[in-house]
Amino acid sequence: MNVHLKVQPHHLERGAYLYIRQSSMRQVVENVESARRQYALRGRAVALGWRDEQIIVIDNDQGESGASAAWREGFQRLVSDVGMGHAGIVMGLEVSRLARNNADWQRLLEICALADTLILDEDGVYDPASFNDRLLLGLKGTMSEAELHVIKARLRGGILNKVRRGEFRCLLPTGLVYDHFGNVTLDPDVQVRETIIHFFEMFSRLGSASQTVKVFRNEGLLFPSRLHNGDTLFRPLTASTAMRVLNNPRYAGAYTYGRRQFRRTIDGKRTLRARDIDDWPACIPDAHPGYISWERHQENLRILKANGRGFEAARASIPREGPALLQGRAVCGQCGSHLRVRYAARRGRQEAWYICNRARIYRGEPMCQSIAGPPVDEAIGMLIAEQMTPAAVELALEVRKEIQARHEEADRLRCRAIERAQTEADLAQRRFMLVDPNNRLVADTLEGEWNGKLRTLASAREERERGREHDQFILDKAVHERLVAMTADFNELWKDPDTPSRERKRLMAHIIEDVTLLKLPAEGTTRLHKFASRVAKSRRSPP
């Protein structure tokens, strides 16, 4: 059919909408000829009879992908105006400019057919209400969507091929950098390296991410964070940062890719979903230097999983503040599940109860058993005191050595912070000395930066002095003598009300792995069966 026969007077009474789009900002900057070709369609509209003031250009979707209409405001406006009958013709250089998604394209065709709106591309003018034109436009939309799939598959295939060899360069976490040859190495900044090493050592000692964060806060230590421009900034350690570092396998020297998968929701937002390690496109252990071993990383992940407060998981959780001595280590003698701890205020004090109520909560069955905590904890305490008393002094000295080593490591990190602040202050001083004194605008700015660096240096030195005073107070001779005197009778230390419940549980972890409790109502007793840990077994074994 002749093009001019398709364009009717009622079409010319309405506006001519010219839709312009390119997929990325790089294309907008570099592919200027494509933009000129799209804007040149104004001449086609004028040749068909539209006046220049009737032509409405929609070009606010520049740099947006055509894979969906959810995030394209210009396309949404176009569809809205077509549906309200304001458009006589819709112009686009090709179908892919209007939509790469066949669903969006078919929706536009349906609305154009109902509103009697024509469609123009570089090849001609089409009437969506005509079967032949509608069939051709539908085929073009299908080919446009298939073309996008082929382009993505080609690019994705090249990336995955490099990923399988471990050569695709990904964004590295703080503490890892690329050298001049493109290989992954540890950060050359000594303070960054030592801080991250101290973080992993602290987690190995404490077994808890939140406790590691508290130690960093109490010791006044900062954790490195890399900014988008590549600079490194030291900030207070947060729980989210600690979890992110512990879960990142790059710190274990493993090359990984595809740990998370992005999806688009119906409203156009990107959602993040974690993948299982078996679904990762690449996981190559020992691919580059790391701060910990791959086995240590796997153990850290198991500890984090065990620390979760999941009700279903039968696990020995980390020691907490409650007085229940067997928290996370008591096992039900009837069903084999770990007993939960419940606290109740009775007789003016907080008492613990070990209960097994999973069957009642999940299946409505009777509760397995409920056992009062104080008698059980007292019996376990007596057992621990008997086994630990011969080695109490030796254990206290080992604990003191470990604390002293931890304090020395923290002081070394504070010294690194002072060295960094001193370097930045010296650099600011040299910049100020080189400026022309008559140029007061620049001189005043550089002087202010120098003063700021000096204040940062003074703050770092004060922080180190406060930390050393605090550590010295903990490790002074009087405290050491008091500790040795108390360990002469471990039972006194165990019953000391000033000893935190958390520390009692940590001591018990070296002796007992778990305790099975079986309540015997007929006899009015509770039977205990303990399973000794490896540490306790090695101590009891003959030389």
Image (cartoon, helix red, strand yellow):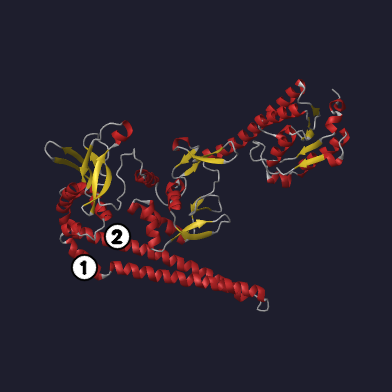
Kindly report the distance in space between the C-alpha atoms of the residues bearing marks 1 and 2.
17 Å
Q: Is residue 325 visible in this depiction of the protein?
A: no
The percent position of residue 353, horizontal first and vertical second, equals: 24, 45
Q: Residues within 10 Å of mark 2 (few under 14, many from 20)?
A: few
Q: Residue at x 72, y 47 (%)?
A: 29
179 or 201: nearer the viewer: 201
Question: Tag 1: residue type?
Answer: Glu
Q: Residue at x 81, y 36 (%)?
A: 16
Q: Answer with the quarter of the image where residue 153 lies.
A: top right
Residue 426 percent across, percent down from the top left: 54, 72
Asked which secondary structure carries label 2, the reply is: helix
Q: Residue at x 58, y 73 (%)?
A: 448
CB-based contact (under 8 Å), mark 1 and mark 2? no
Q: Is residue 334 shown left or right of residue 122?
A: left
- Residue 9 coordinates in the image, percent (x, y): 87, 30
Q: Residues within 10 Å of mark 1 (few under 14, many from 20)?
A: few
Say above or below: 533 vs 99.
Answer: below
Camera-nearest label, 1 or 2? 1
- Judging by the rendered image, the residue that carries numbered circle 2 is 402
Q: Quadrant of the N terminus?
A: top right
Secondary structure of the residue carrying tag 1 is: helix
Considering every residue shown, the one lying at the far front of the view is 347
In the drawing, does residue 296 fall left or right of residue 60? left
Q: Could you say which quadrant of the image residue 82 lies in?
A: top right
| Amino acid at dot 2 | Glu
Tell me where residue 41 appears, x and y as whole percent: 82, 37
**Rendered view: 507 above or below 310:** below
Q: Earlier in the sequence, mark 1 or mark 2?
A: 2
- Residue labelled with disc 1: 481
In the image, is 540 to the left or to the right of 345? left
Numbered-mark total: 2
